[in-house]
Amino acid sequence: MSRIVVLTGAGISAESGLATFRGDDGTWNSVRLEDVATPGAFARDPAKVHAFYNARRVQAAQAQPNAAHVALARLQAEWPDAVLLVTQNVDGLHERAGAAEVVHMHGQLDRALCAGCGAGTPWVGAMSAADVCTACGRPGGMRPDIVWFGEMPYRMELIEAALAQADLFVAIGTSGTVYPAAGFVEIAAAAGARTVELNLEPTGNPRFHEVRTGPAGEIVPAFVA
Ligand code: BV8
């Protein structure tokens, strides 16, 4: 069972050129999450939601993993059963850096779900309401396989079980704004784990025993070395 739980957020992909959500040029400064990242938004205006995720799917495909993604992939390869790599990101950069096992608690841009039958499928390229579900044949039901606000993140039991037994919890590049991910440090600390924050700006969460600040591309390789 993993004794190290790593949680990554948008900040780990910033040096790969992908926007974070809440920084100065954060995505939620230019788009209201209520308009593109909730089931209600998709019901109201699927074309707007598809356009938002189609653009991010293109940006993610054009981005390259950075030294932080590579360092975590190497750590996982060196300790294959000891590291649970959980990401809030949907950009696929951990796998493209070579990470073997990634827990995508908020879903993935390169997957689609059928709102009709619930079937999931890998997805490349733009998605629209015209797309037909390859499993049930239903037209107009395909949605991005993304966990929106108000939806239950994926694999929470696995994550919570690992946090309850962790010796070390490391949060990288996340503002600690969104739950339940923001509460993971509390679970880990209560279970007696050492908790570390690697971030460009510290969140100030007192549950972190250690905080290292700087760009992930520098401080993550140094931390896992
Ligand atoms: C749910 C997919 C219930 C979309 C996302 C308490 C408990 C439970 C829920 C709630 C709660 N309180 C409120 C809620 C509701 C809500 C919530 O948390 N709201 C917030 C706004 C208060 N949570 C939910 O709705 C969750 N679901 O609770 O379901 C339920 C229960 C039963 C049954 C059914 C349902 C679902 C949350 C998931 C939403 N989806 N992502 C998409 O990606 O398009 S969340 C969204 O925020 C992002 O996707 C991202 O994944 C996430 C977190 O953001 P961060 O990754 O932290 O990014 P951010 O920009 O904020 O910060 C960047 C950080 O990087 C900064 O610290 C910065 O300093 C740093 N940085 C920048 N550059 C660098 C760097 N660090 C290092 N190097 C650099 N170069």
Image (cartoon, rainbow, N blue to C red):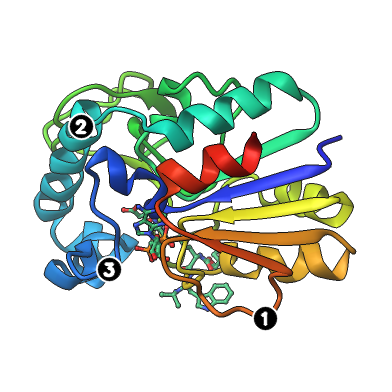
Q: Earlier in the sequence, mark 3 or mark 1?
A: 3
On whether ligand 1 comes within 8 Å of the CB at mark 3, the answer is: yes
Label 2 vs label 1: CA separation?
Answer: 49 Å
Q: Nearer the viewer, mark 3 or mark 2?
A: 3
**Which residue is nearer to you in this view: 37 or 133?**
37
**Image marks 2 and 1: residues in contact by CB distance under 8 Å:** no
Taking the spot 23% from the left edge, 53% from the top edge, the residue there is 19
Taking the spot 46% from the left edge, 33% from the top edge, the residue there is 69
Q: Which residue is mark 2?
A: 139
**Image marks 3 and 2: residues in contact by CB distance under 8 Å:** no
Say which element carries label 1: loop
Say which element carries label 2: loop
Taking the spot 33% from the left edge, 60% from the top edge, the residue there is 39
Q: Is residue 176 visible?
A: yes
Is residue 214 found left or right of 49 in the rendered image?
Answer: right
Tag of residue 206:
1
Q: Amino acid at mark 1?
A: Pro
Q: Amino acid at mark 2?
A: Pro
Q: Earlier in the sequence, mark 3 or mark 2?
A: 3
- Residue 8 % position (x, y): 52, 49
Q: Which residue is mark 3?
A: 23
**In the figure, residue 73 lies in which quadrant?**
top right
Q: Is residue 115 visible?
A: no
- Residue 127 % position (x, y): 17, 33
- Residue 211 % position (x, y): 61, 66
